């Protein structure tokens, strides 16, 4: 399973291009442009499992740094400020990482 089987490559390219400049990443805009926000909950759960690269059941800070590269291998790393904003928006239970339900909530309802 890869993100390309859930999203179109044109939408992924557009989303990655929108946040090329460091510290310009906005997860709300990104999820909308890449098309994930318009997908079904089960497809969003599939995307979560791709982004949880080490299959720990959570997206951790280290995985978030590589977030854009999981969409497009040539993309940049997220900055420390961007990963911090991303985690704090999603992390309702305060464990410092993003669980599957927190991810669905973030994509669909934030
Ligand atoms: Ca993980």
Image (spheres, rainbow, N blue to C red):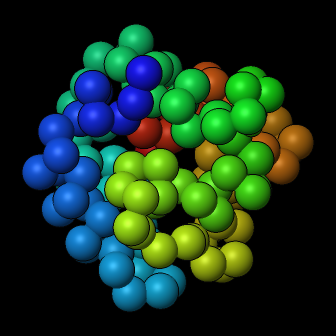
Residue 2, image x, y percentages: 40, 30
Q: Is residue 58 left or right of residue 32?
A: right
Residue 70, image x, y percentages: 47, 49
Can residue 82 be seen at all in this image of the molecule?
A: yes
Q: Residue at x 30, y 65 (%)?
A: 16
Q: Is residue 103 left or right of residue 84?
A: left
Rendered view: 96 above or below 42: below
What is the residue that sits farthest to the left in this orientation? 10
The image quarter in which residue 43 lies: top left
Q: Is residue 72 left or right of residue 53?
A: left
What is the residue that sits farthest to the front in this orientation? 73
Image quarter of the N terminus: top left
How many numbered marks, from 0 up?
0
The image quarter in which residue 36 lies: top left
Can residue 98 be seen at all in this image of the molecule?
A: no
Residue 26, image x, y percentages: 41, 67
What is the residue that sits farthest to the right in this orientation? 95
Q: Residue at x 47, y 58 (%)?
A: 69
Rendered view: 101 above or below 19: above
Image quarter of the C terminus: top left
In the foreground, 108 or 82: 82
Rendered view: 87 above or below 39: below
Rendered view: 29 above or below 57: below
In the foreground, 62 or 36: 62
Figure quadrant, ligand 1: top right
Q: Residue at x 76, y 47 (%)?
A: 60
Residue 89, image x, y percentages: 61, 54
Q: Is residue 98 left or right of residue 93?
A: left
The image quarter in which residue 44 lies: top left
């Amino acid at each position: 399973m890869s993100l390309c089987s859930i999203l179109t490559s044109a939408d992924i390219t557009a989303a990655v291009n929108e946040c090329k400049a460091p510290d310009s990443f906005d997860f709300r805009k990104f999820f909308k442009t890449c098309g994930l926000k318009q997908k079904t909950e089960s497809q969003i759960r599939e995307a979560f499992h791709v982004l949880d690269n080490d299959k720990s059941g959570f997206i951790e800070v280290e995985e978030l740094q590589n977030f854009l590269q999981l969409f497009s291998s040539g993309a940049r790393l997220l900055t420390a400020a961007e990963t911090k904003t991303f985690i704090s928006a999603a992390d309702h239970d305060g464990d410092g990482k993003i669980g599957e339900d927190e991810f669905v909530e973030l994509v669909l309802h934030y």
